[in-house]
Image (cartoon, rainbow, N blue to C red):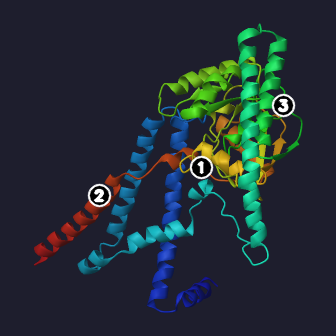
């Protein structure tokens, strides 16, 4: 059966020598892909265990360079092994052989489940025909010329008003239960204004969160707007990266007022400080429910990358939240490497609506004999099942890595040394 399937594959590929070469190359690429998948899994675990337990990127630069070196060392070893396996081939054939480069390309085509986690959805073009194109054009004018200015004016006016009220409350009201309730109401109103500026349709399922000691909420992460979507239901304090520009001003002067915890990926000392603040917040009940995104980075709402174990080591009940965005009008995924948050908001505000479902799931506790990593994986599967996401074993922080130019130079050096050794052997034989 296998022989006949291989034969039919070769016939489909062309039947000749070129077809057989393609089949062999694809098989070898799949084999190499399995090896490199193992390398990526190991790197993901290394990065998670050594530095990024809370999803905040502590010691990020140090560990990024360390894991990058390990990846490059493994790829060098793979290239040396390939050349040893092909040592029996002739010198001319080895000099002209480009199969290694082609295999890398074929392996990338065969499976690239890592970069798929961070690709935006490509909209399907269905209305560019004689009948629907005028309607699409009219809709474009309505969205950009009518809706966008109205939404922007509404957002700026309400955001400014509620933030002035919130600032005066922080400044003038004495600390009391009334002040806490009042500030929660203001924060919720601010988030409702943001969500309304996208004409968002958010459907919530399950009981709403209530702040209490010994509890932490975790969710899959698609965009910075996740916090706004959740906080318009119940205001959350959250753990997030410190951003520059106008977003950083909002974080410093507004969000800091209700217990949000910030970190800087470039500061190695931040990790310990953030971990201590999180543990103290959960233990003493900071007033607002604490929300953590264990993935540590934005993923495109089709996949779920590795959950960091730090949120599951707090000796607290973990309350999962699953967020599923409907891409019917706009893709809510924010790719921070290719798009500023301001442009991301413009994209949302010029769409017809943002549609999402939010699922508040039952609190989970660590089971007897269960490790923090197993606990994190169990909660991740719950969230992924409810939000219809595919779980992948990659650490999301690996998207910030790029191969060093030295790696290409090292592969040239390995290849050159192999040719040199063959030439020396040939001279000795003569």
* Quarter the N terminus occupies: bottom right
Residue 211 visible to an observer of this rendering: no
Determine the image quadrant of residue 110.
bottom right
Q: Residue at x 89, y 40 (%)?
A: 206
Q: Earlier in the sequence, mark 3 or mark 2?
A: 3
* Quarter the C terminus occupies: bottom left
- Residue furthest to the top in view is 174
Give the class, few, some or many, for how many residues have Cα within 10 Å of label 3's Cα (few <14, many ≥20).
Answer: some
Label 3 sits on residue = 209
Determine the image quadrant of residue 383.
top right
Q: Earlier in the sequence, mark 1 or mark 3?
A: 3
Q: Secondary structure at mark 2?
A: helix
Q: Is residue 394 left or right of residue 421?
A: right
Numbered disc in front, either 1 or 3: 1
Label 1 sits on residue = 335
Q: Residue at x 11, y 74 (%)?
A: 427
Q: Earlier in the sequence, mark 1 or mark 2?
A: 1
Determine the image quadrant of residue 101.
bottom left
Numbered disc in front, either 1 or 2: 1
Give the class, few, some or many, for how many residues have Cα within 10 Å of label 1's Cα (few <14, many ≥20).
Answer: some
How many labels sit on residues? 3
The correct choice, above or below, for 71 with respect to 13 in the image is above
User: Residue 25's spot in the image, x, y percent?
Assistant: 47, 76
- Tags 3 and 2 touching, CB below 8 Å: no
Q: Secondary structure at mark 1?
A: loop
The correct choice, above or below, for 104 with respect to 70 in the image is below
Q: Secondary structure at mark 3?
A: loop
Query: How far apart, in angstroms, are the residues tagged by discs 1 and 2?
Result: 31 Å
Query: How far apart, in angstroms, are the residues tagged by discs 1 and 3?
Result: 28 Å
Label 2 sits on residue = 409
Q: Residue at x 30, y 72 (%)?
A: 87
Query: How far apart, in angstroms, are the residues tagged by discs 3 and 2?
Result: 54 Å
């Amino acid at each position: 059966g296998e022989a006949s399937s291989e034969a039919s594959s070769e016939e489909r590929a062309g039947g000749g020598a070129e077809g057989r070469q393609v089949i062999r190359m694809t098989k070898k690429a799949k084999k190499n892909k399995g090896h490199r998948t193992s390398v990526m899994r190991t790197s993901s675990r290394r990065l998670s265990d050594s530095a990024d337990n809370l999803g905040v990127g502590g010691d990020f630069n140090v560990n990024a360079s360390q894991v990058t070196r390990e990846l490059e060392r493994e790829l060098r070893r793979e290239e040396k092994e390939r050349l040893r396996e092909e040592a029996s081939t002739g010198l001319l054939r080895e000099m002209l052989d480009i199969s290694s480069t082609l295999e890398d390309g074929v392996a990338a085509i065969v499976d690239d489940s890592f970069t798929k986690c961070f690709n935006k959805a490509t909209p399907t073009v269905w209305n560019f025909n004689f009948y629907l194109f005028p309607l699409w054009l009219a809709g474009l004018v309505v969205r950009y010329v009518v809706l966008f200015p109205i939404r922007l004016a509404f957002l700026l006016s309400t955001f400014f008003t509620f933030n002035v009220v919130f600032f005066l409350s922080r400044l003038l009201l004495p600390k009391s239960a009334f002040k806490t309730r009042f500030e929660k109401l203001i924060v919720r109103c601010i988030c409702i204004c943001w969500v309304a500026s996208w004409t968002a349709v958010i459907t919530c399922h399950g009981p709403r969160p209530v702040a209490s000691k010994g509890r932490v909420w975790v969710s899959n992460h698609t965009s910075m707007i996740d916090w706004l979507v959740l906080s318009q239901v119940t205001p959350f304090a959250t753990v997030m990266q410190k951003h520059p520009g106008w977003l950083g001003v909002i974080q410093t002067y507004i969000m800091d007022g209700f217990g949000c915890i910030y970190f800087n990926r470039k500061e190695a000392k931040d990790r310990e400080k953030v971990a201590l603040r999180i543990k103290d917040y959960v233990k003493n009940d900071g007033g607002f429910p604490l929300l953590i995104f264990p993935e540590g980075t934005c993923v495109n709402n089709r996949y779920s990358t590795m959950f960091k174990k730090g949120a599951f080591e707090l000796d607290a009940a973990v309350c999962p939240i699953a967020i599923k965005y409907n891409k019917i009008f706009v893709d809510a995924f924010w790719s921070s490497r290719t798009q500023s948050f301001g442009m991301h908001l413009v994209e949302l505000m010029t769409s017809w609506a943002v549609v999402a479902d939010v699922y508040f799931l039952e609190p989970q506790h660590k089971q007897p004999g269960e490790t923090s990593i197993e606990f994190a994986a169990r909660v991740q599967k719950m969230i992924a099942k409810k939000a219809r996401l595919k779980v992948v074993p990659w650490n999301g922080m690996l998207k910030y890595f790029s191969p060093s130019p030295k790696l290409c130079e090292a592969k040239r050096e390995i290849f050159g040394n192999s040719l040199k050794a063959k030439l020396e052997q040939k001279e000795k034989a003569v």
